[in-house]
């Protein structure tokens, strides 16, 4: 009996390892697997957003944070002009500032989606190994409406990472970049003041 349990345990870990490897190598599985994890949080822990918001947001962040290339995304949000003006320390600080604000915004947005379902569009043919950029499309079904979600991914030494998200036609990367530029201009292009006053705001991306 003990031997049987041990064999089952070994098979279980092999299965987990296989799924993990497939997820890292296949951008569609990578996005879909994590999207379904977030759906589980939305349905199983919906009340947490009202009773313990910090715990709810942490559940979302644990899933979402490893999926994004925050260094690349934050540089894109700053834009070439302000990225070159900023010091290395300011660039590094903005990575952390942007990460916290984006994750807070995303977790709050997810809470409004309720018992939603997300389906991933799997292609008939997987991309070639040398492909570094890819788009993964999903449909968010809120029960009353359906909205398209598009993830732009780039392959790095750590596997596939999200570099931009388009929700219902709203390009979050471009939206945040426009916000950064407007904020920088309002502070006379003072990077330090811009960073101190930065808040990610994508609204509800037209999702009701």
Image (cartoon, rainbow, N blue to C red):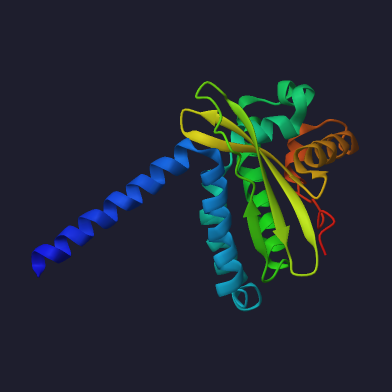
Q: Nearer the viewer, residue 154 or 72?
A: 154
Q: Nearer the viewer, residue 50 or 85?
A: 50
Q: Where 182 sits versus 63, above or below?
A: above
Q: Quadrant of the C terminus?
A: bottom right
- Residue appearing at x 85%, y 56% in the figure: 206
Q: Quadrant of the N terminus?
A: bottom left
Q: Nearer the viewer, residue 2 or 208?
A: 2
- State left or right for residue 84 relative to residue 7: right
- Residue appearing at x 46%, y 33% in the figure: 158
Q: How many marks can you see?
A: 0
Pinpoint residue 2: horizontal percent, then vertical percent: 9, 67
Pinpoint residue 148: horizontal percent, then vertical percent: 76, 50
Q: Quadrant of residue 28?
A: top right
The answer to whether residue 69 of the structure is visible from this angle is: no
The answer to whether residue 85 of the structure is visible from this angle is: yes
Q: Where 107 sits versus 167, above or below?
A: below
- Residue appearing at x 15%, y 61% in the figure: 6
Q: Where 20 sits versus 40, above or below?
A: above
Q: Extreme front residue here?
A: 124
Q: Quadrant of residue 123?
A: top right
- Residue appearing at x 74%, y 34% in the figure: 77
Q: Nearer the viewer, residue 150 or 72?
A: 150
Pinpoint residue 178: horizontal percent, then vertical percent: 85, 37
- State left or right for residue 69 relative to residue 23: right
Pinpoint residue 18: horizontal percent, then vertical percent: 35, 45
């Amino acid at each position: 009996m003990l031997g049987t349990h041990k064999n089952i345990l070994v098979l279980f870990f092999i299965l987990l390892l296989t799924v993990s490897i497939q997820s890292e190598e296949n951008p569609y599985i990578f996005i879909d697997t994590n999207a379904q994890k977030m759906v589980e949080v939305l349905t199983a822990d919906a009340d947490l957003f009202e009773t313990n918001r910090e715990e709810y947001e942490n559940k979302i962040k644990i899933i979402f944070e490893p999926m994004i290339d925050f260094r690349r995304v934050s540089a894109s949000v700053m834009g070439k002009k302000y990225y070159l003006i900023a010091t290395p320390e300011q660039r590094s600080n903005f990575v952390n500032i942007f990460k916290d604000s984006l994750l807070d915004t995303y977790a709050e947005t997810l809470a409004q989606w309720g018992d939603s379902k997300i389906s991933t569009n799997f292609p008939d043919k997987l991309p070639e190994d040398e492909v570094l950029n890819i788009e993964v499309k999903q449909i968010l079904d809120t029960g009353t409406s359906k909205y398209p979600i598009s993830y732009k991914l780039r392959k790095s030494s750590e596997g596939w990472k999200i570099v931009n998200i388009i929700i219902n036609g709203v390009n979050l990367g471009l939206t945040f970049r426009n916000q950064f530029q407007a904020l920088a201009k309002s502070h006379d292009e003072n990077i330090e003041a811009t960073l101190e006053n930065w808040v990610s705001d994508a609204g509800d991306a037209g999702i009701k």
